[in-house]
Amino acid sequence: MCQMLRAPLLLPTPVRSHPTDNPADIFRFAVRCHQAGMAVALATLVSIRGGAARPLGSHVAVAADGRFCGYVSGGCVEAAVAAEALLAMAAREDRLVLCGEGSKLIDIVLPCGGGLSVAIHLLRDIAAISQILERLNARQAAASAYVPARQSLSVSTPPERSGWRDETFLTLYRPPTRLVISGQTLEAETVGRLAEASGYEVVHLSKGAGRTGFGQEIDAHTAVVVLHHDLDQEEPILDAALQSPGFYIGALGSTRTHRKRVEHLKTLGYAERDIDRIKAPIGMFGPARDASSLALSVLADVAASRLMAFAP
């Protein structure tokens, strides 16, 4: 159920523009619509009661022509939220929408049985979201600060997590996962294709790449996947990865192969705590005997490791 104000207005029918929950895609949609001369609203999930399909800070951008982009739930309330955003545009003021548990009107029952509060803000300008996009494009964390009492949205210092700070709701945005893949193997090609389909930023290293050739690519939101069948070929890649802030380092090979890897790295002077950063055998499950299974195992492991590294 979703609390919705009824008004005898002829408003567009909400229709999803395209399916995405990537904040950068949602902001780009909002920027394009604003630049086209349309009014735009940004809906933000600011409270969860019980279970929820999306985390705090999730967004839906809504254009005056009825198109919307993003998710604040699993898809069951977004059209209703977009309709409320259109009413907010007509009234020219921000509003708070209650969905599910706690709503006064019975409209949409959330399958999870919980309740959501969604703040709808009219984007009077796009300065804040444009600055956030610039920071994300530069692979920097960013944050927005929404103050309902002032109906204002601004850029803020990134907090540890999204949520309320007094009368301000802060939303944290992190760069997307970058996956650096080393290896000219079928496994490397398959992991790359699946990663790209998953929306990751994929960097394929050329044969013979060394630390000076790609070390700058590995930031805190980068996973390094080493898929060689020769330990000598992977040495410069592991050297760069172990000296980086990357959140995941995985290497192909059996447990026996990894023991050889560990002994070799120790002879090169690597500390045990650094060597322990290498996940080997690579992947979440195994043994994977074909490239497709290995790719699923690797990407599942990368996704789980990112969640652990940047817990909401």
Image: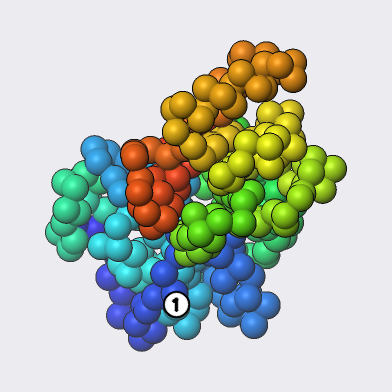
Q: Tell me the residue at 67%/22% (across/down).
A: 265
Give the secondary structure at mark 1: loop
Residue 159, by quadrant, is top right
The residue pinned by badge 1 equals 17
Q: Position of residue 61 (x, y in %)?
A: 49, 65
User: Is residue 117 depicted above or below 4 in this figure?
Assistant: above
Q: Position of residue 143 (x, y in %)?
A: 63, 44
Question: Which quarter shows the N terminus?
Answer: bottom left
Q: Position of residue 191 (x, y in %)?
A: 49, 55
Along the viewing direction, whichever of 112 and 167 lies nearer the viewer = 112
> Does residue 169 appear anywhere in the picture?
no
> Does residue 196 appear anywhere in the picture?
yes
Q: Tell me the residue at 44%/77% (across/down).
A: 17
User: Is residue 267 depicted above or below 100 in this figure?
Assistant: above
4 horizontally vs 21: left or right: left
Q: Tell me the residue at 30%/49% (across/down).
A: 53
User: Is residue 47 depicted above or below 134 in this figure?
Assistant: above
